[in-house]
Amino acid sequence: MEKQQHSSGSESPVLPPVPRKPRSLGGVIPAPRQDSVDLPDSPTGSHVEWCKQLIAATISSQISGGSVPPEAITREYKVGKKIDFKVSRRTNLRAFKDVRRQAPMDEVPLVPGETVKTTVKDVMYICPFTGAVTGTLTVTDYKLYFVSLERDAPYILDVNLGAISRLETISVQSLGENTSGMEIVCKDMRSQRFAYKKEEQSNLEILEVLTKYAFPLSNELSLFAFQYKEQFPEDGWKVYDPVSEYKRMGLPNESWTISKINSNYEVCDTYPALLVTPTSIKEDEIKRVASFRVKHRIPVLSWIHPETQATIVRCSQPMVGPTDRRCKEDEHYLQTIIDANAQSHKLTIFDARQSIVAENHKAKDGGFENENFYSNMDLNFLDIPNIHVMRESLRKLKEVVYPTIDEPHWHSAIDATHWLQYIRLLLAGAVKIADKVESSKSSVVVHCSDGWDRTAQLTSLSMLMLDSYYRTLRGFQVLLEKEWISFGHKFAARVGHGDENHANSERSPLFVQFIDCVWQMMRQFPTAFEFNELFLITILDHLYSCLFGTFLYNSEQERVENEVNSKTVSLWSYVNSQPEDFTNPFYVDYENHVLYPVASLRHLELWVGYYVRWNPRMRPQMPVHQNLKELLYLRAELQRKVEELQKEASSSHSISSSSEHAYSPSNGGTPLHTSV
Amino acid sequence: MLSLGGVGAKSTKPSFVSYVTPEEIKLEKEPPKKEIHPDLLPGEVEFCSANPILKYTQDDLSQRGIFGTLFCTNFRITFISDEISQEETTKTFKNKLYGENDIPLMCVDHIYGVYDEKRKLITGGLVKNKYPSKMIFHCKDLRVFQFCLTYTKEEDAKRIFHGIAHHCLEEKSLKCVFAFSYTGTPSPEMQRKRETILFDSPEDWTQEMKRTKANCRLVTENENFDLSQRLPKYFVIPSALGDLFSYQGKGFPIWCWSHHSGCALFKASLPPVTQEDGDIQKHVDIMINAVAHNYLYSAKTEDLSESLPTIQDIQQSYNKFKQFFLIENSTDFWLSDMKWFSSLESSGWLDIIRQCLQKAVEVVECLEKENTNVLITEEDGTDLCCVISSLVQIMLDPYYRTLMGFQSLVQKEWVAGCHSFLDRCNHLHQKDKECHSPVFLLFLECVWQLVQQHSPAFQFSETYLTVLSDSVHVPVFSTFLFNSPHHRESVMKAESPLAQSSQLSCPTVWDWSVQFDSKAQNFFFNPLYSEKVKNERAVRKPHKLKHQRQLSLPSTAFKTPFKKGFFKDETESLKKMLRVKRLSRWIGSPDSSAAISREFYESWQQRPLDYHGLLLPCLDGLAVRVWMQRYLRWIPEVHILGGGSMAVITKIMDLLSQVQDLKRVLEHSRDSSQAAKLDHSPYIQHRLLSFGSSGRLSSSFPFSFSRNQSFKPIIPTGLMQCLMVTDSLASQEDEASSFVSLV
């Protein structure tokens, strides 16, 4: 047909397809499983598959200022004829066909270390988008895998057990007396319903098996990350080394030192072993400060401005209490922070909470710095509600976007969830912090209650605005490792890895919210980030999946105790083994530009590519990036040829480096299809 | 009319003032200043002026501003700052006709006067001896200007206020429009070859029929507008249509476009209602019959006035919608930010856009999937018919997604198609509110939705659409000035001896060089447009299989009706019955038709995307968006410095020029003997938007530069005003455990 012809035309020999999987990572020997990434039997294969479409959509949206909401066919895509259609637009059609030859459709692809626990036939999946399908359901210790060969295109549903929040039996009387129903509610904004026959023996256990492996910690099993045996050429555990990261910032210097006071996690069990504290503060003083700060989370340096020496310092709230307790050491400590920055004699304390809430905390022995006791300090409340409000907001959001969208009232429904308003608050707070550091050259202290939720959001966002290094693929990994993972954002508690207590009030999507903020920044500055939307979604998917050890446990101490680094694989091993997939083709290094996103709802948008990706109608349409990739390829090709020629040419003629740029305005778009 | 050139010498001449009171200004003895005059366009005449006028800088709450002189000419209201502003010169994207501080008279939407702190809408008749202390201008391109009159001498203030009110608000006659005084010479740059097809000659229509392989009849009987003044000079009708004069100029099915299968789209105005019922019925039947004869005896009609919002609805909705963007100060902005999404929804504007696109998709489905002829009707046949027919053609025909094609389409469906631009755009400030409606803007909005969803399919950029939407209100061009070709011809005839010896020199809007230099015109093009590979061009494959199957049916036999098709048989009763059925099917149950076209969309979505084939918009709630560039461009609070889509375009432009450079180097070194050939390369040798990486372009329009690296971020105010969470969650502890134990 016409369409196919055209699509194959765009992959014509004129422009050879962009290499499908350039795994040459500086001479590293390719992993044993060469194609693992693109195949559905890899942990992330299908993921990468649809995400490429998603990038396409995102990029095109960046061009026109809006976007066609991309969908995700993630694990709900259809293989077979239809996938051929989709794939034919890209370059890895052959790969898919190969897979189909190797593995029949009803065979469950497994990741290394994964074992099948139960298989049940004749299960009906009640898909909210395409109607019920009957097929085979397989439960492994890592995923739930449903295949239906009923339709002309095989239908596959693939859900990580880690993403499951709760399992429930539902009534499916309409399907007959002997039918049981099961609903799976996921953390990643979707739910699935299954119906299966009661009488068969094997079926009885399906819910039990599922429960057991979906919530291993509640069933005395270990998380799947400890069974996962994939090997990657890159070692993600080496991405973050605190000493070299501090060295990059120019630390230690005369005012700040890398302290080993917490090397045994004795001062603060939720902080990392290495902390940057003012040089002049002695150990016993630090300990007294620690006893005045909630959870002993003393003020420590997160970031230092390379020119002005203004710092971002994070901590928990002071234990002022109802009697307005003072701690001289704490006051002195903050004064020392002011003194460490010659450019300013002021310190701004950003309390992320609402002032009323902070006031209430005083009654519970918490509180905030009294400006009368802390001279030279401004206290600013950023008015950000707590984790419970955020959890509720996301819950409402799910109701709005899954499974169906109430179109006529879409906008007001989004308004009512307040999700974007909270994103706006966070961005506005981070902009304030970044502005204080950059424009006023003054140091800032950021805290909320415990200093591991909103504090981590705010410090990492403002660091992202201030420091272009964190906007690179590696730099962002460092940022997460540092501000979130090592500084004790309670991932285990907030996500509830392997835990069946779905109603635990400790759970909250604070990290999701942060990544959403990053996405909003990416939308506003489409060329400022080296990584792409796929990278962010990958992070969020593996926040839940329990495949990698990166986001497990609550603190560095727990991670050391459980030998996470030696017994599990890091997410960054996977990401850094194929960085091309996660790279933004529009990236321009802005050097030291500070980015101030506009914290107005006019520029914020619901992250459809993540929250609404399960809806097939939201499928991304146009791979604009294909054009761009062709262009990049063309440039590379030309550069290569020019270099060759230069080598060949016996320097008889000098290549005039004409700086004139040619562009024909009469036909607008420069033809990308011209032959080289 | 007021006297010309009333620029009396002013005693005071403040250069820059922020917090300085006028008393202080008067104390400053300044050297006698030079008279400032605006650079007048050819034919432009200055009416009155006043000085000093304080122009508030919009982004500031502190009532600060710049002093300068305010002029009113027969073309515009212009403010000239007493300082020499350098900003203008650094603009990459500059309009040659009017600058940042110019408001073409036709572009003025509303003027508000502030009298004793109270804001009042100034209407034409209200002008008395009073004048306001402050004038607020809301422009049709959504700019907002605030001028303070209190520093001006009373008589000057009165004169300028009355002058402006008179020229902007009073109902005036068409001949007062600047276009008839403009004497600019048409630029020779206009490349004759690539010119937009204007559809004002029989050849244009024949050519278009040939291009689409249409099998219709060109009507030349209306050359002197004998048939009707509300019909184009030349138009095309189904070949089966007989006697033309019995129609009284109404109810002609006018050919719009032919699908490659042979079926075609027609539009028609409804026959006059005064006739007897039976007569109308007969008329309609003849119309449908003629349309059906075009291809395979199948036709569908759709009365757009029944299924789409009325032009009054459109006007009302847009009025609500635009208020969100006419921002006078930061406080207003942040206040309106709180309920942003809900406000959007309440205006209904996005929903109207969706409805139009939806209707267009339905028509596309009939043409593309069912190969049925379609006749869309409307009382006048020149409003929503234009919207829908143009959208359908853009979705189906890649030619209309090129810049020239799009301009030809606007000419064909809108300008030649008798859209009443003069009335709809209210160019003459008529009091009659009934006939004003931003129908053409609605069309551009719909096109923008398509552009943002499928940008590689379009040769033009959103900037082009934004500029086009502004150009409607620039009274230099004749394109959007008239109600119909007949109107145009009669006015032009009447006016020409007055203006000049031979012809009026009204350029068409398509002569972009009148407004922009070639560098700025580069912004009109989409750098990622995926151009059709040349050799593929000729082959336009019809859906062969489908085609043959249908043709294999004996055409005289009773055919099974298409899924929701209406098929025409010779027997009147059956025809009527079927038609009634079909009408109720289409109009009575919009839900199911939406569901069916959703199916159509989904099946299209499944197929690989071809930018040179059928293009459908996604119409889900989240896919229809606000045209940010157009609506947010003047609001400083939302400008992303160094970001926005401009950043991406810059990157692509850089890349493109690198590629070109490399190609050149390659060619050069490959064959140095033929180096001379390079000079004959088809590229126009100028530096392309060479904004490199040294400066950062603002996301704002018209993309001003910023070279300073540090700038103040915009920090919202009143963040929590409606977010005060009062439920128990907010007061809940973050932690289940308390920290008392740690003390």
Image (cartoon, coloured by chain):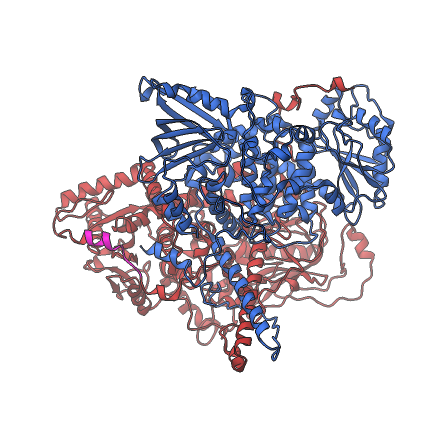
Chain colours: A blue, B red
> Nearest the camera: B240 or A104?
A104
Q: Residue at x 38, y 58 (%)?
A: B398
Q: Looking at the rendering, in which quadrant would you find the N terminus of chain A?
A: bottom left
> Nearest the camera: A147 or B443?
A147
Query: Residue A417 appears at what percent x and percent y?
Result: 54, 31
Q: Residue at x 62, y 41 (%)?
A: A236
Q: Residue at x 56, y 37 (%)?
A: A540
> Nearest the camera: A271 or A351?
A271
Query: Residue A472 appears at what percent x and percent y?
Result: 63, 48
Vertical comparison of A280 with B142: above or below: above
Left or right, B690 with respect to A408, comes to right
Q: Main secondary structure of the magenta part?
A: helix
* Residue B624 visible at all: no
Magenta residues (range): B540-549
Which quadrant holds residue B335?
top right
Badge count: 0
Query: Residue A46 appears at what percent x and percent y?
Result: 46, 41
Vertical comparison of B219 with B189: above or below: above
Q: Is residue B146 magenta?
A: no
Left or right, B578 with respect to A17, comes to left
> Nearest the camera: B734 or B617?
B734
Q: Is residue B545 magenta?
A: yes
* Residue A355 visible at all: yes
Which quadrant holds residue B218?
bottom left
Query: Residue B341 appears at what percent x and percent y?
Result: 53, 38
